[in-house]
Amino acid sequence: MNSPHVVRHKSLVEREDREKLHGHKGAVLWFTGLSASGKSTLSHMVEKRLYVMGASTYVFDGDNVRHGLCGDLGFSEKDRVENIRRIGEMVRLFVDAGIIALTAFISPFRADRQNVKTRMGDDRFVEIFVDCPLETCIARDPKGIYARALRGEIKDFTGISSPYEPPENADIVIRSDRESFDEAVSKILEFLKQKNLIFQE
Amino acid sequence: MNSPHVVRHKSLVEREDREKLHGHKGAVLWFTGLSASGKSTLSHMVEKRLYVMGASTYVFDGDNVRHGLCGDLGFSEKDRVENIRRIGEMVRLFVDAGIIALTAFISPFRADRQNVKTRMGDDRFVEIFVDCPLETCIARDPKGIYARALRGEIKDFTGISSPYEPPENADIVIRSDRESFDEAVSKILEFLKQKNLIFQE
């Protein structure tokens, strides 16, 4: 927005300075997958490993976003698009702050994920597809929400009454029904090292 | 929002852990004041001092928020309220991430600032009133926007065609027409030390 209200100021501390301070790059690990696929558990486990290595991290999930920044949004397709847009814009600033941000949202639409990636820059956006067959997610159903969705009690529920578009070129694919969480965490850490987003332990 | 879509997960890394890593507390330095009062310049100078001390920081201003997270909002009273609400919610997560966030927005309405403070917690919200007489701001007018507002070319311009409600109990007041920026920076750093938000140099 080219608004007369906004005057551009020069930063005295840049992303590179903050990355130097933190000892790693700013990046987002964008977990996507069905409900109950293991995104949130996995993201918290990766954060823990990164923290132990001395990295500055933050996990975003429904708990800390849906009640706050996006508390005015519902679950219609339009609101889901806006939800992911806002999360993407917020996370972009965390990355600029030199943080490793981990996001655990279903984020079912390919175009929305692509928009975030484009805004962020390819080299700072790591797409992690937590791939788990729908029937396994339904069998897990830790809170009985699939059961309710299957009974038609929940509108627009991804996988049941709303589509999930799997990534076509995810940076990392985790088959959470076949791989252990520990294996998955190691695979993600290895990727970050190869891309020089974090330094060797 | 108590939604069936949101399942609560346990964090393995808490704010206290991240604060320990960073060596200081998470907090927001909320600068408020008229356009051209010096908020943005001052916030960048404080960030630089904090960075040199080894603190993890980030400055939010119109540049990085108005084009992104709040790119869909205008400058009507309703949109300004939503603008500050979103910034407040985002900054709350930065504070949870153990960052010292500095915000440089006019944020003209007392109730909006109070809402952010209430959501954040009193001890993590430092309100800094950059107090400068309107006539001085008009005389500075670095981009000629006051001139345009006075000619009626800009709607809802704070101080001219939209009210500014000064803080009644700011933690710090800077008279930017009387104090030098260096004096103001030192005053702010001193306050942060006294409150144990940062550690002694």
Image: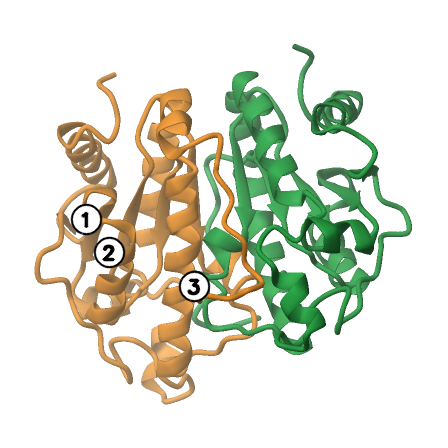
Chain colours: A green, B orange
The three-letter amino acid code for the residue at tag 1 is Asp
Please tell me whether residue B73 is drawn above or below residue B187 in the rendered image: below
Please tell me whether residue B21 is drawn above or below residue B175 in the rendered image: above
From this viewpoint, is residue A31 visible? yes
Say which residue label 1 marks.
B122
Label 3 and label 1: CA atoms lie apart by 18 Å
Please tell me whether residue B201 is drawn above or below residue A61 in the rendered image: above
Which residue appears farthest toward the top when viewing the image? A201
The three-letter amino acid code for the residue at tag 2 is Lys
Q: Secondary structure at mark 1?
A: helix
Q: Residue at x 42, y 44 (%)?
A: B94
Which residue appears farthest toward the right when viewing the image? A168
CB under 8 Å between discs 3 and 2: no
For label 2, count other residues whose C-alpha is less than 10 Å away and answer few (under 14), some (14-19) or many (20+): many
Tell which of A121 and A183 is nearer to you: A183
- Give the quadrant of residue A43: top right
CB under 8 Å between discs 2 and 1: yes
Give the quadrant of the N terminus of chain A: bottom right
Same chain, labels 3 and 2: yes
Give how far across and how far down residue A19 sits, in percent: 57, 27
Q: Residue at x 22, y 18 (%)?
A: B200
Chain for mark 3?
B
From this viewpoint, is residue A8 visible? no
